[in-house]
Amino acid sequence: MGTWGLEGRVARKRAWKLAALSLLIAGATQAATPDRDAIKAQVAQRHDASVKALQEWIALPSIAAESRNSQQGAEYMAKLAREAGFQHVEIVDTGGKPGVYATLDAGAPTTVGLYFMYDVKQFDPAEWSSPPLEGRIVDKPGVGKVMVGRGATNQKGPEMAFLTALHAIRDAKQAMPVNLVLVAEGEEEIGSPNIGKLVLRPDIQAALKKSIGVFMPMGLQDGDGTVTVNLGAKGVIELELVADGNAWGRGPSKDVHSSLKAMVDSPAWRLVKALDTLVSDDGNTVAIDGYPKAAPLTADERAMIAKSTAARDEALAKRNLGVPHWIDDLSWQQANERLVSQPTINIEGLVGGYTGVGGKTVLPHRAVAKIDMRLVPPMTRDGAVAALKAHLAKRGYGDIAVNVSGGYDPTSTDADSRLIQSQLAVLRRDGFDPLLWPRIAGSYPGFVFTQPPLSLPAAHFGLGRGGGAHAPDEFFVIESAHPKVQGFDGAVMSYVDYLFELGRPTGVATGR
């Protein structure tokens, strides 16, 4: 009796385990093969509301450089997260502009991190064809119906498309395939000076540590429908170099009459001469003494660049940029190799003395150069800034102030990571032949995820197209005129498909 009782209990336990495992597998399979048509129907049903929500978000610009609407922007970001289904949402004090931290617990075995920015670049309405905060929908020849507004593509359009995907999955009564951990900052456009205080707060760091990686929504399609999967980004440093008569001890301590240049030193000329020492004679190569060295391109990176440039139209690129030649009249492939592999020093603006209408004969006491410096692996922000300061001191310009406002290291992610392989799987299933690109020439603070202590893959993802980031008439495509380029709803579905691919158990196909 005792033996049969024990065997019975063992048999029942085994049955319970098998039943639980069957339920787990069934749930995982259901999550991996959602009712895509039901979700797509919800996306279409929500289209007008989502477009209106994007317009309302564009109408609230958070501009870190101007300390404009940062608190309101964080509160609005938090509101959008709550509405999209995040259960825990909080505004985080970073010591600078506030961040937002949110989690969505779906009870799923896989967790995915998200990086958002709610801030945007400055704008001059006089340079725009329609009001930059209106989010007006206009016909763009050859492109389709686009929404024009500051932040439309960088990054509110793609981010709103992602949030719409969460709404659609929930409204279609489908199980969310992954848990989500969201961090959103309001200082990306000034070099993310406090991103570590947000991401590396112990509880936020612990939540992100459970994820398989972090991605940022982004419209990654070119005008012909080509899709690029980026494996990294350059780092950036934003700073000002300031020449001031008081600090120098030679120029005037206030603006004086320009006739006195015959007997008074000029801080403006001093700044110009100092700037000239930072680069080669043509301005195209960094010439700072002891500057960190860039790693040469690998054979794999050269192959990626060769394949990508062969698939893209050089003449169209030149026309879109308004440039007749590349540096040194390089070939299309050589120019792109340089784009990926070389650090840069760029003068964003020069400010000094009188800049109004007509002339004003003054000798300015102060001049400022607004600079950005792009970095490639294995360079670091700290190493580049230290070399710049040492160079200026060595060349006799130690009085020129180096005021760093933000910046961070470059970032790289392995193509074999689950984050990237899931992107490739989704894109190929949708009929695309995605191009791999070693690193974008622009920057985002992916380093905080890819470097210790998190050491996670980090990337961008999303179909759809935009343009004009940081420029007048920034836009995001709402209804595409090109059959291979996704409009807003297609961008939404790309995030739906990506989330389900990320949540797919090994060996369970998602299908269509």
Image (spheres, grey):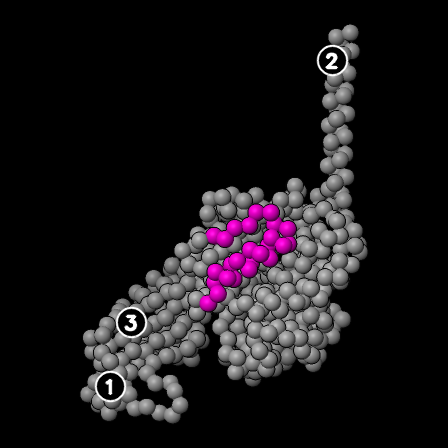
The residue that appears at 50% across and 78% down in the rendered structure is 124
Q: Amino acid at mark 3?
A: Ile
Determine if residue 436 is in view: no
Q: Earlier in the sequence, mark 2 or mark 3?
A: 2
Badge 3 crowding class, 10 Å Cα cut-off, few under 14, some 14 to 19, many 20 or more, is many
Picture coordinates of residue 328, whole percent (x, y): 50, 79
Q: Name the mark nearer the viewer: 1 or 3.
A: 1
Q: Residue furthest top?
A: 1
Residue 388 picture quarter: bottom left
Mark 2 = which residue?
6
Range of the magenta residues? 68-92
The residues bearing labels 2 and 3 have C-alpha atoms spaced at a distance of 84 Å
Query: Callout 1: helix, strand or loop?
Result: strand
Badge 2 crowding class, 10 Å Cα cut-off, few under 14, some 14 to 19, many 20 or more, is few
Residue 110 picture quarter: top right
Q: Name the mark nearer the viewer: 2 or 3.
A: 2
Mark 3 = which residue?
400
Q: Name the mark nearer the viewer: 2 or 1.
A: 1
Mark 1 = which residue?
256
Query: Callout 3: helix, strand or loop?
Result: loop
- Is residue 412 found left or right of 386 in the rendered image? right
Foreground of the two, 147 or 349: 147
The residues bearing labels 1 and 3 have C-alpha atoms spaced at a distance of 20 Å
Picture coordinates of residue 209, whole percent (x, y): 54, 44
